Structures are given as structure tokens and as C-alpha cells.
């Protein structure tokens, strides 16, 4: 399928980048925007950790701290944990299904530019006078208070992001369902594609709830409605219900694609099909559906009736079952495999074992008898940092390395990738594990300052050191990826010897991906490594 | 003296221990085979170049669906049993009303006596640093009787706050326009922290108060000092 005489897709002029409808370029733009905001959010996290090193306020005022925390939360979730999938989804989905682009390329460009507009608004809130200090949750009535900052920015950012992700979700769902090349059946397609399908369906069902909630917030603040203002008959808990109806499922929007990436890498580097592939697909949809029935666990102490807390505690812990199935299946994929411990495989394995800690510490948060002591404490913060800060981020970094040769046409330095991983693992475990302990001791979250309790001081000191080590590890890993675009060796078309469709075309992919739409034979399967050995001998 | 420092923290402690045991077991059940496979089935030239064919094992899959289901349903049911006690105050509780505001707490006792604690009453005015509970001025402390269950009726004057009693490991939000409730009991006299645990703006991290737990007789004496009732009864005595 090799084509001759084309320029790689990325050596285009500025104008071509701006007006492009090419899914690969749009994917790259998502990725770069996402990474820039990941760095801003990461730096604000380091500033937060520095302030918490000692009790008292050393480096910033309470307001600055609250702003830094708001920025960290909003950017890490929407620009990193959600938007990074815009990058993977756009770039890889058409390649995996044998399509030349997504179903609606121009809509796809619109999605990115709406996201870009939201990014610009987010940067404007960094300017003096526009600081938002209401955390990413923006609970009223606090968000209606002067102290919270200009809520309009927040509402408009959410609207732009919402429009962007709705358009993108519909686009990718349609592409996946209608544009698969002959021979790629729903049953045969990559688990990556199943994960992205479920993730996009969650987006389509959930985003309107959040958009509604922030619209009502905007109306309350600027047009004197009273949806959430209790002094005029509104109910602040209505916001929490609407907010979490989307914002709990959104954690599966973040983590399901990570599961997809993990499945791809575990299969490729064990050189066998994922164990229990059908149950994997059922588990993905189980998580996606159950994910809409658990949101009250964010409100266990909010004053909702006791009986509803109990019902939602059962639904919440049941999510552990499909999640557990996925973990067991990954572990048993290793069984009798031929395991290559390359850098992306090590990132993935780290992601699995860290996700296990994140998952096991999520179970008790679904138990009101446990949650009542740690709700809104650092225990919760540590839990979702194991899931998002570690499992998701490690899976993303694994994905960066895994598809690096495909996307850039060059290889990264294996040694530096592994060094980066070791530093990240040391730093983040030192940081987040101690965060569990300080949380169990009662440390409230979102505190700029804390009382001088001896054990808390020690734990915070060590956490800050861990955070700095983590920051350094991320720096090493990213620097390796950046420098390798110039210094890396030329990559082969299929360095991992995977039969998945994106690896059967040249690296980097030609501008139109496939000269001819491929017809995949009966015995082909994205995880049939023997088929590859038979048909694509080097 | 009661051995347990505070209720309902003891229920939380048991729930915590059950969960920790279950979690460690699950972690090992996953980690040990994982590590073993990683070592045993590593690619070696000439020895383990190709993966072997493994058929799916329906038995294994059913096993790791059913056992976790039973485990999580047990955990939720255990939590249900504990939570009933953790939520519902014993019958002979003393009722106090706590009203949260930006940024501080109002404690109202059954006889109408009130105590106010502000964000700046728990810090050293010179450097704005947190004091230790013993260093806080007694007039800002909410006195409570030891070994007595306290039922708290909570509300808020402005935004949502949360009332978290540190030694009792219990909390509930204070929501404007609603009255929520929680209970606790501290058995050992001493001074303990209360923290706000719902983000509420600039001074959120200083929105703490000190509970001064004293023996019952001492509490009764304190409760009747300087209140309207005590002045009225003084008048009657004249």
C-alpha cells in the first residue's frame, strides 16, 4: 500500500494547518493544545504543593491559591483528561477503520476551533480582574457570590467545550459506525474503537445536563432568575444534581479511552488477543450505562435523603465489577504471552497497577459509612489522582510512545522513556500515597492553609517533595518525545509488528491514509499476530 | 471512662479496617499472578518467541464476575448497617443548632446561649497563622459535655459549608434554606477541631472552630453563665 512521492502530512504551511480538515492535523492540534494546558495546570499544581509544604501562607494569598486550584482542576479535567482523547480519537480512529477521514471533516475542524476559542477564554481568566475562584465544580450559591469571580467566563467556556465535544462525539460515532472498511466488523474492531464509541455516547447523553446547569447559573447571576438562590425560592442542590449527572459520567469519558489504549498495548506487547474480548466489550458498556446511575455519591453529605444515599451506594460499588473484569482480563492476557517490556508496555503496566489502587480506594467512597469521614478530604483527592493523575496520564504517555513512530515517522529514545517512567512512578507514589494518609487523618481539601498538626506537616512536606520529583519525571519524558522528533532514528512502518490497520500503512501515514480502501480478509483480526507473520513477512 | 475517643468514629474505624483487608487481598490477588506472568512469559529469543494459544476460560470469567459482585454487595450492606447508626442520633441527645456563615460558625445551645467562632479567632493576629486549639481564646470555643451524644441541626446563612467534627469522623453539609442533621459524641475531655469541608471562598481554609469538651458538671456551670436565663434566675433570687 506504499505510496510514492508525497510530503508527510505535518510538513504543511501555517495556512494549511489553520484551514485544514485533515483528521491527522486536527488530531495533532488537539494534542499540542492539550499538552500546553497540561503544562500550565501542572505548574499551578507545583505552586499549590509549594504553598502546602508548610502551614501558614508563604508564597501566595488565599485568593491566589484558590485561583490556582480552580485553574488546575478545570484545565486538568477538560483540557487534559478529556481533550487529549480528541487527539487520539481524531488521529487514530479513521486509520484503524480504514477510512480516509472522519465522516464530517469540516465539522471536525469546527470542533477544534470551538475548543480553541474555549482555550483562549480560559487564558483570559488568567489576567488580573478576571480571576475565577470557585473551583471546577462552581457550586451555587457560592458561585453567585462576588467572591467567586466572573462566572460568565466559566459558563461560556463550558458552552464552547460542550458544543465542541458534542460535535466531535457525533462525528466520531458516525465515522465509526458507517465508514469501517469491508471486513472490519463491529465484533472484529479494535477495543480502542469500542472504548471511544462508548465514551462518545456518554458525551452525547451527558453534556446537555452540564450545559443546562451552567446556563441556569449564568441566568441566576446576570438575569436575576432564581434557580439556585435559596433566598428567592431556588434550590442549590438542583445544580449539584445536574452537574454530577454529567460530571460523574465524564470520569468514564476520561478513563474508558485510557482502557482502550491499555488494551491495544497489552495485546500488542503480549502478542496475543485480549483475554475475554467479548466480556471486555460488555464491561465497557456496563461501565458506560452504570456510570449514569451513581452521581449521588458526590452528594452523600449534601443533605439529600438517607434512603437515596443507600441506593446509590449499591449502584456505585457495582461499577467495581465491570472494572474488575477489565483488570483481570488484562492480567490474563499476559498468561502464556510472549511479553516485550518496551517503554509503552511499561507505561501501560504501571497504569494498570496504579488504576487498581485508584479503583480500590474508590470503592469506600461509595460506602456512606466510610465516606462520611473522608468526603471532601485529601483522601478523595488522592483517589482521583491515582485514577486520572496516574492511570490515565500513564496510559496517555504509553500511547504517546506507542504511536510515536506512526505519527512522527521517528523512534523515541527507549532509555530516556524508561528513566522518565521510573522518576514519575517514584514521585507520584510518594505524593499521592501520602495524600491518602493525610486524608484519612481528616485534612480537608481545597485548604490554602492547615493547622499545625505534627503528622500533617510531615506528610505535606513529603508530598511536596514527591510532587517535585513527579514534575521532573514528566519533564524528562516529554523532553525525550520533543527532542526525538529531530534526533530520533527513522522508524519502520510497523515497529511493533501489529496487524491493527493503522500499522499496515507507512509511517508517517500518507496524506490520504489509504490509496485504496482496504478490504480486510476473513482471517484478519487486529489482534491476530500470526496472520501478520504469515502475510507481512519482512 | 469510655475507651473510645468519640462516636460514631468507631463505626468508621471498623468499616475502614474491613475495607482495607478486602483491598489488600484483592490487590495481591491481581498483583501476584500479574508479576508472575510478567517474569515467566517474557519474550526470550529461541525460548518464548511466540505467544501460545489460550482459549477463553468461561469458568474463570464467571468466577471473577460473581466473587467481586458478592464482595461489593457485602461491603455496601455492611456500610448500610453502620450508616444507620452513624446517621441517626441516639434518643437522649443534646440538641444544638449550628449556623455556618462566610466565614465562621454560630453555635446555639438549648437554653439560647450562643457562641460565635470566626475565621480570625483561630489564628494569631500577627502572622495570620493557625493557633493550636488550646491557644484559641476560650470565648470562641463551643463547650460540650463529655460522654453525651450531641445532635447538630445545621444550616447556613449564605453559601454551602460543611460541618466536620475531626475526632468523630463525621460531617454533613450546611445548606442555606435547608436544615440538615448529624450527631457525635466525644468521650475524652479536651479541645478538638471542627473544619469547614465545603469550599466557600477566601477564608475557607481558616473556617475552623474549637470544641472544648469538659465533664458534664463543668459544662452545666458554663452553660448557665452569663445567659439571659441565668440573669432572670438571679433576679428571682433577689
Image (tube, rainbow, N blue to C red):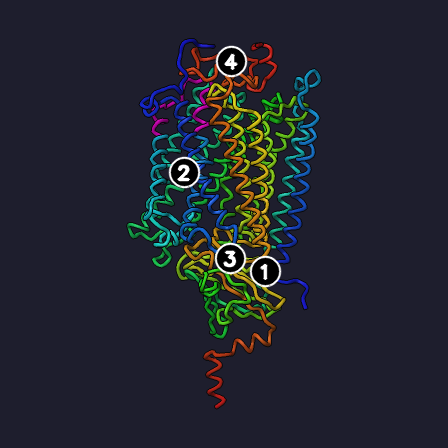
Most foreground residue, A73 or A172? A73
In-image side of A277 versus A25 (left or right): right
Tell me, yes or no, whether dots 1 and 2 are on the same chain.
Answer: no
Q: Secondary structure at mark 2?
A: helix
Indicate whether residue A89 is drawn in magenta. Answer: yes
Q: Identify the subunit bearing mark 3.
A: B
Q: Name the residue beneath numbered marker 4.
A: A520
Q: Name the residue beneath numbered marker 3.
A: B172
Q: Identify the subunit bearing mark 4.
A: A
In-image side of A364 versus A63 (left or right): right
> Measured along the vertical axis of the image, is residue A98 above or below residue B103?
above
Q: Few, some or many C-alpha atoms within 10 Å of disc 2 (few <14, some 14-19, many ≥20)?
A: many
**Separation (CA) of disc 4 from disc 1:** 64 Å
Most foreground residue, B49 or A515? B49
**Separation (CA) of disc 3 from disc 4:** 58 Å
Pair 1/2: label in front: 1
* Residue drawn at 51 percent across, 67 percent down: B136
Query: Tags 3 and 4 in contact by the CB under 8 Å rule?
Result: no
In-image side of A263 versus A218 (left or right): right
Q: Secondary structure at mark 1?
A: loop
Could you say where residue A128 lies in the image, as x and y percent from the top left? 33, 47
Query: Tags 4 and 1 in contact by the CB under 8 Å rule?
Result: no
**Separation (CA) of disc 3 from disc 1:** 14 Å
Task: Look at the image and give the residue range highlighted in magenta.
Answer: A87-111
Q: Name the residue beneath numbered marker 2.
A: A207
Q: Few, some or many C-alpha atoms within 10 Å of disc 1 (few <14, some 14-19, many ≥20)?
A: many
> Could you tell me if residue A321 is visible in this image?
no
Q: Name the residue beneath numbered marker 1.
A: B167
> Could you tell me if residue A418 is visible in this image?
yes
Q: Earlier in the sequence, mark 3 or mark 1?
A: 1
Where, quadrant-wise, is the C terminus of chain A in this rendering? top right
Amino acid at each position: 500500500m506504499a505510496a510514492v512521492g508525497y510530503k508527510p502530512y505535518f510538513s504543511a504551511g501555517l495556512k494549511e494547518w489553520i484551514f485544514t480538515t485533515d483528521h491527522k492535523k486536527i488530531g495533532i492540534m488537539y494534542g499540542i493544545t492539550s499538552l500546553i494546558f497540561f503544562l500550565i495546570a501542572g505548574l499551578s499544581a507545583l505552586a499549590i504543593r509549594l504553598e502546602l509544604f508548610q502551614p501558614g501562607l508563604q508564597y501566595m494569598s488565599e485568593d491566589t491559591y484558590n485561583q490556582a486550584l480552580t485553574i488546575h482542576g478545570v484545565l486538568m479535567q477538560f483540557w487534559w483528561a478529556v481533550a487529549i482523547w480528541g487527539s487520539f480519537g481524531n488521529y487514530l480512529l479513521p486509520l484503524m477503520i480504514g477510512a480516509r477521514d472522519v465522516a464530517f471533516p469540516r465539522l471536525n475542524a469546527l470542533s477544534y476551533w470551538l475548543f480553541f476559542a474555549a482555550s483562549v477564554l480560559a487564558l483570559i481568566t488568567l489576567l488580573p480582574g478576571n480571576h475565577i475562584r470557585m473551583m471546577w465544580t462552581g457550586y451555587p450559591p457560592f458561585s453567585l457570590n462576588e467572591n467567586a469571580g466572573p462566572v460568565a467566563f466559566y459558563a461560556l467556556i463550558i458552552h464552547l467545550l460542550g458544543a465542541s465535544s458534542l460535535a466531535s462525539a457525533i462525528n466520531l460515532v458516525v465515522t465509526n459506525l458507517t465508514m469501517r472498511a469491508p471486513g472490519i466488523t463491529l465484533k472484529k474492531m479494535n477495543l480502542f474503537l469500542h472504548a471511544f464509541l462508548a465514551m462518545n455516547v456518554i458525551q452525547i447523553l451527558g453534556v446537555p445536563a452540564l450545559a443546562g446547569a451552567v446556563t441556569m447559573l449564568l441566568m441566576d447571576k446576570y438575569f436575576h432568575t432564581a434557580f439556585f438562590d435559596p433566598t428567592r425560592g431556588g434550590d442549590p442542590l438542583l445544580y449539584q444534581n445536574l452537574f454530577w449527572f454529567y460530571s460523574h459520567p465524564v470520569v468514564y469519558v476520561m478513563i474508558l479511552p485510557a482502557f482502550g489504549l491499555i488494551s491495544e498495548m497489552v495485546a500488542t506487547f503480549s502478542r496475543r488477543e485480549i483475554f475475554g474480548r467479548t466480556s471486555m466489550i460488555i464491561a465497557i458498556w456496563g461501565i458506560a450505562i452504570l456510570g449514569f446511575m451513581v452521581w449521588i455519591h458526590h452528594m452523600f453529605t449534601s443533605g439529600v435523603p438517607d434512603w437515596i444515599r443507600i441506593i446509590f451506594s449499591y449502584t456505585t460499588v457495582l461499577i467495581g465489577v465491570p472494572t474488575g473484569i477489565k483488570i483481570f482480563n488484562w492480567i490474563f492476557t499476559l498468561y502464556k504471552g510472549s511479553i516485550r517490556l518496551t517503554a509503552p508496555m511499561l507505561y501501560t503496566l504501571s497504569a494498570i497497577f496504579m488504576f487498581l489502587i485508584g479503583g480500590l480506594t474508590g470503592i469506600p467512597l461509595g460506602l456512606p459509612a466510610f465516606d462520611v469521614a473522608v468526603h471532601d478530604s485529601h483522601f478523595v483527592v488522592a483517589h482521583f489522582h491515582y485514577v486520572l493523575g496516574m492511570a490515565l496520564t500513564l496510559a496517555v504517555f504509553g500511547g504517546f510512545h506507542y504511536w510515536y513512530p506512526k505519527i512522527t515517522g521517528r523512534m523515541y529514545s527507549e532509555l530516556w522513556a524508561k528513566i522518565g517512567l521510573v522518576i514519575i512512578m517514584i514521585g507520584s507514589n510518594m505524593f499521592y500515597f501520602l495524600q491518602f494518609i493525610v486524608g484519612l487523618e481528616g485534612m480537608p481539601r481545597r485548604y490554602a492553609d492547615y493547622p499545625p498538626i505534627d503528622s500533617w506537616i510531615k506528610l505535606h512536606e513529603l508530598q511536596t517533595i514527591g510532587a517535585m520529583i513527579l514534575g521532573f519525571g514528566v519533564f524528562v519524558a516529554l523532553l525525550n518525545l520533543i527532542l526525538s522528533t529531530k534526533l530520533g532514528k527513522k522508524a519502520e512502518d510497523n515497529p511493533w509488528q501489529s496487524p491493527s490497520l493503522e500499522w499496515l500503512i507507512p509511517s508517517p501515514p500518507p496524506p490520504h491514509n489509504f490509496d485504496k480502501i482496504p478490504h480486510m480478509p476473513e482471517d484478519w483480526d487486529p489482534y491476530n499476530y500470526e496472520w501478520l507473520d504469515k502475510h507481512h513477512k519482512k | 471512662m469510655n475507651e473510645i475517643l468519640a462516636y460514631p468514629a468507631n463505626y468508621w474505624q471498623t468499616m475502614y479496617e474491613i475495607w482495607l483487608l478486602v483491598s489488600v487481598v484483592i490487590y495481591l490477588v491481581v498483583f501476584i499472578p500479574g508479576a508472575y506472568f510478567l517474569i515467566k512469559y517474557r519474550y526470550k529469543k529461541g525460548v518464548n518467541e511466540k505467544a501460545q494459544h489460550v482459549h477463553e476460560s468461561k469458568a474463570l470469567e464467571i468466577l471473577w464476575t460473581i466473587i467481586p459482585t458478592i464482595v461489593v454487595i457485602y461491603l455496601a450492606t455492611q456500610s448500610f448497617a453502620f450508616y444507620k447508626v452513624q446517621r441517626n442520633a441516639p434518643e437522649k441527645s443534646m440538641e444544638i443548632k449550628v449556623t455556618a456563615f462566610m466565614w465562621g460558625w454560630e453555635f446555639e445551645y438549648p437554653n439560647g446561649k450562643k457562641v460565635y467562632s470566626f475565621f480570625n479567632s483561630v489564628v494569631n493576629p500577627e502572622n495570620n497563622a493557625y493557633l493550636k486549639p488550646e491557644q484559641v481564646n476560650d470565648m470562641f470555643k463551643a463547650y460540650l459535655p463529655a460522654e453525651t451524644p450531641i445532635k447538630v441541626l445545621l444550616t447556613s446563612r449564605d453559601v454551602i459549608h460543611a460541618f466536620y467534627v475531626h475526632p468523630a469522623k463525621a460531617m454533613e453539609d450546611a445548606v442555606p434554606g435547608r436544615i440538615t442533621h448529624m450527631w457525635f459524641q466525644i468521650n475524652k475531655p479536651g479541645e478538638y477541631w471542627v473544619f469547614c469541608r465545603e469550599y466557600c471562598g477566601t477564608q475557607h481554609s481558616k473556617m475552623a472552630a474549637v470544641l472544648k469538651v469538659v465533664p458534664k458538671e463543668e459544662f452545666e456551670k458554663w452553660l448557665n453563665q452569663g445567659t439571659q436565663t441565668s440573669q432572670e434566675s438571679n433576679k428571682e433570687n433577689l
